[in-house]
Amino acid sequence: MTILTGQVALVTGAGSPDGIGFAIAKVLAAAGARVAITSTTNRIKSRLKDMGEVGQHLALVADLTDADAVAQLVKDVNAGLGRIDILVNNAGMIQTGKHERARLFHEIAAEDWLRAMDINLNTCFHVSRAVLPQMLRRKYGRIVNIASVTGPLVTNPRSAGYSAAKAAMVGLTRALAIEVADKGITVNAVAPGWIETGSSSKSEIVAGKHTPAKRPGRPDEVAAVAAFLASREASYVTGQMLVVDGGNSIQEYKGPSGKGRMY
């Protein structure tokens, strides 16, 4: 069982009550950590009541694509909870109130491409860069980046921006991990596959049912992996990408069972 008593965590992208970010925040809190959660809107304030003991946790609104806003966020977390031992970079995909259109690569406008990099990669860059100095001073830290199988392992049409950003997040994970491996800091990535959240489309749920596990994953199943990587016990695991996809990325045939099989 993961024990995080006395640790302080910052989890980004935790505004959705049934999303991966909030699931991670709840698991870390249950393990004994004090947790700061953040999203781009005030709905993050509503998540505090589900976090456990009142006064132990913190909810803050921040635009993580803005380096100055990130600097203020980290300052506020340090003021409220004392420090940051664990950083979970979960923010990405879309931002509340923003409409993202899927397009074929040659149809992507330059501003849309930059936007995809901004919310899926640069958020991770800004927050990690802001938090890392205090980890280096204390010679301890855990950084967990929530990437995706989309990009590093597989992809879909009309997802070039997202795929490129998530693949780059894994590259960033490895590059940073090797820089700080002898400083008591680990940096790892979790790559979820088809996970059923409140934002999942019907087609995504169907895809989840065609995994070897025959179902989509749950946010708490991703959270369990993130919590392990955030623990002291994971001290010799760094620069890695742990896949949570029910075995989907290892199967060759992904259609309906019993149709088109070659074995």
Image (cartoon, helix red, strand yellow):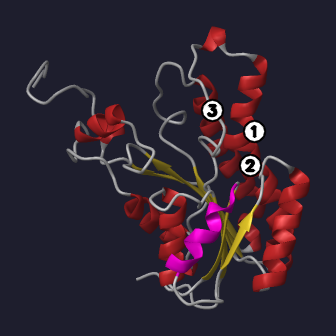
Q: Is residue 47 magenta?
A: yes
Magenta highlight: main SS: helix
Q: Which quadrant would residue 93 be assigned to in this image?
A: top right
Which segment is the magenta one?
41-51
Q: Is residue 224 above or below residue 163?
A: below
Residue indicated by mark 2: 123
Residue of label 3: 99
Q: Earlier in the sequence, mark 2 or mark 1?
A: 1
| Circles 3 and 2: CB atoms closer than 8 Å | no
Q: Compared to 143, does 204 lie above or below?
A: above
Pointer 2 with pointer 1, Cβ within 8 A? yes
Q: Pick the residue in front: 114 or 244.
A: 114
**Residue 221 place in picture, x, y as percent:** 38, 62
Q: Secondary structure at mark 2?
A: helix
Residue 103: mark: none
Q: Is residue 141 shown above or below 61?
A: below
Q: Position of residue 4 (x, y in %)?
A: 56, 85
Neighbourhood count class around disc 1 (C-alpha, 10 Å): few under 14, some 14–19, many 20 upward:
some
Q: Look at the picture and state if 11 lies above or below 198.
A: below
Amino acid, disc 1: Asp
Provide the residue designation for mark 1.
Answer: 118
**Quarter assignment of residue 193:** top left
Mark pair 2, 1: CA separation: 6 Å
Count the labels in the image.
3
Q: What's the residue type where badge 3 is placed?
A: His
